[in-house]
Image (cartoon, rainbow, N blue to C red):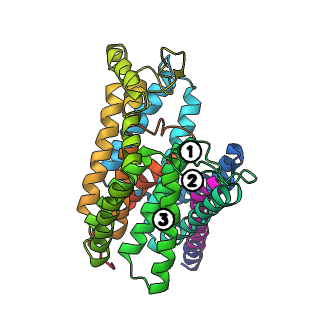
């Protein structure tokens, strides 16, 4: 009996250590993109601090039985199985079965880690808060350094020619492309808004959050990533609707006033952005439709390039819409499973809408769903900023339990 108690105690302590490593690894996965421009170094840190502890935590029985008892998990398992099947055996796939198996395992471990952390709201809140602080710091640092120190133009249309995507100092906060940068910092703008409307804040805390939000919004604005703009607007609006309190109503009012002022003072710039249209995506999507009979059932293979050449000679290798690209790679079965997963997660978020984390997950998922219309090209690949955009809200909603929880807004 005594030996059994000692074993149980040791196992519990071991799980606590693994859980702490999960929290650390999750922070590294979120904020490490800012510190690591070297993708291999970032991947190594994620392997050691997140994926290995997640695997060990799963093998010791942590949360796995509870997570299986929901429809989204079933659809996710079917989707990942189909991705593995098509990616591993379709002749058009760009990787071997083993490589696709490793990728599917990493996604599953990541979702398990995030869902497990959701059950400990204190750990998750600290990790999100820490990553948010890093994002705010580097957003402001980038703005000051690029426009204050380097003297880059910040007036339209010159600013549009120089779209933010990096700090420009020793490779820090280098996200390679303005679209990626806009989506990455946009996620943290949603997280910051969630902290403000969901929990009580003192005046000085509210002031800090306001300064942080201004920095994030300015950064996203100067990426000139319209997909990030619309994603952030849609996600924030949904979040405010899901948290019906005075702070949310006040932000809605301020947002409405801001839109009116923008229309009054920046109407020429708004019309200039409107004239850009879909930025030459129409011919790509038209080509996708014309080629649909070739791949509609089984797809062209996991990771297959959707090749399109413009009349001027410029070439693209994906459909410039994640929904279309997924159908192109994995066929109608993969597409329907993916859409089914999204709908099941939204349904679960609605059922659990009284819980703050469910509201955050719903808002972030809406952010991702809007962004995937035109800006995200892949989610079934190694850890990247797109994991923060898409797989993060999936993991949060998988971990939320269907029970009532007080609103602290």
Q: Earlier in the sequence, mark 3 or mark 2?
A: 3
Tags 1 and 2 touching, CB below 8 Å: yes
The quarter holding residue 283 reads top left
Distance in Å between CA atoms under marks 3 and 1:
44 Å
Q: Earlier in the sequence, mark 3 or mark 1?
A: 3
Which of the labelled discs sits on residue 117, or is there none?
3
Whether residue 402 is visible, yes or no, is: no
Tags 3 and 1 touching, CB below 8 Å: no
Rendered view: 340 above or below 119: above
Reply yes or no: does residue 12 show up in magenta. Answer: yes
Which of the labelled discs sits on residue 158, or is there none?
1
Left or right side of 15 for 75: left
Rendered view: 22 above or below 196: above
Q: Front-most of 243 and 273?
A: 273
* Label 3: how many Cα within 10 Å (few below 14, some 14–19, many 20+): many
Distance in Å between CA atoms under marks 1 and 2:
7 Å
Q: Secondary structure at mark 3?
A: helix
Left or right side of 255 for 183: right
Task: Please provide percent x and percent y for residue 267.
Answer: 36, 50
* Label 2: how many Cα within 10 Å (few below 14, some 14–19, many 20+): some
Q: Secondary structure at mark 2?
A: loop
Q: What residue is shown with label 2?
A: 154
Left or right side of 321 for 347: left
Task: Please provide percent x and percent y for residue 8.
Answer: 54, 73
Task: Please provide percent x and percent y for residue 246.
Answer: 27, 78
Please tell me which residue is depicted at 32% across the width and 49% down the height of the picture.
Answer: 72
Q: Secondary structure at mark 1?
A: helix
Please tell me which residue is depicted at 58% across the width and 60% down the height of the picture.
Answer: 139
């Amino acid at each position: 009996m005594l030996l059994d108690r000692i074993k149980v105690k040791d196992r519990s302590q071991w799980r606590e250590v693994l859980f702490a490593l999960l929290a650390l690894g999750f922070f590294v996965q979120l904020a490490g993109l800012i510190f690591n421009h070297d993708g291999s170094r970032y991947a190594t840190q994620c392997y050691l601090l997140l994926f290995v502890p997640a695997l060990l935590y799963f093998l010791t029985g942590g949360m796995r039985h509870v997570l299986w008892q929901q429809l989204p998990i079933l659809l996710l398992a079917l989707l990942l199985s189909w991705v593995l099947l098509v990616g591993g055996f379709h002749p058009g796939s760009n990787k071997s079965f083993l490589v696709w198996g490793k990728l599917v395992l990493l996604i599953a471990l990541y979702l398990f880690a995030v869902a497990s952390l959701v059950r400990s709201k204190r750990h998750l809140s600290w990790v999100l808060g820490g990553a948010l602080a890093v994002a705010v710091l580097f957003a402001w640092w980038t703005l000051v350094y690029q426009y204050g120190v380097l003297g880059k133009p910040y007036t339209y249309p010159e600013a549009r020619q120089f779209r933010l995507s990096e700090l420009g100092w020793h490779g820090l906060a280098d996200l390679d492309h303005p679209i990626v940068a806009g989506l990455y910092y946009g996620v943290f703008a949603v997280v910051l808004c969630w902290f403000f409307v969901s929990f009580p804040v003192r005046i000085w805390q509210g002031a800090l959050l306001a300064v942080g939000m201004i920095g994030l919004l300015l950064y996203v604005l100067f990426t000139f990533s319209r997909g990030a703009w619309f994603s952030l607007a849609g996600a924030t609006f949904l979040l405010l609707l899901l948290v019906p309190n005075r702070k949310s109503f006040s932000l809605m009012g301020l947002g409405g006033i801001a839109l009116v002022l923008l229309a009054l003072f920046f109407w020429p710039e708004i019309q200039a952005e409107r004239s850009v249209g879909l930025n030459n995506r129409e011919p790509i999507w038209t080509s996708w439709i014309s080629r649909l009979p070739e791949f509609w059932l089984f797809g062209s293979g996991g990771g297959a390039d959707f090749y399109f050449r413009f009349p001027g000679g410029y070439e693209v290798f994906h459909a410039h819409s994640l929904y279309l690209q997924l159908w192109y790679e994995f066929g109608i079965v993969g597409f329907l499973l993916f859409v089914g997963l999204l709908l099941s997660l939204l349904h679960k978020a609605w059922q659990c809408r009284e819980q703050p984390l469910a509201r955050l997950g719903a808002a972030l998922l809406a952010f991702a769903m809007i962004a995937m219309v035109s800006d995200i090209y892949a989610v079934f690949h190694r850890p990247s900023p797109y994991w923060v955009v898409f797989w993060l809200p999936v993991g949060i909603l998988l971990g939320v339990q269907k029970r009532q929880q007080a609103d602290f807004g």
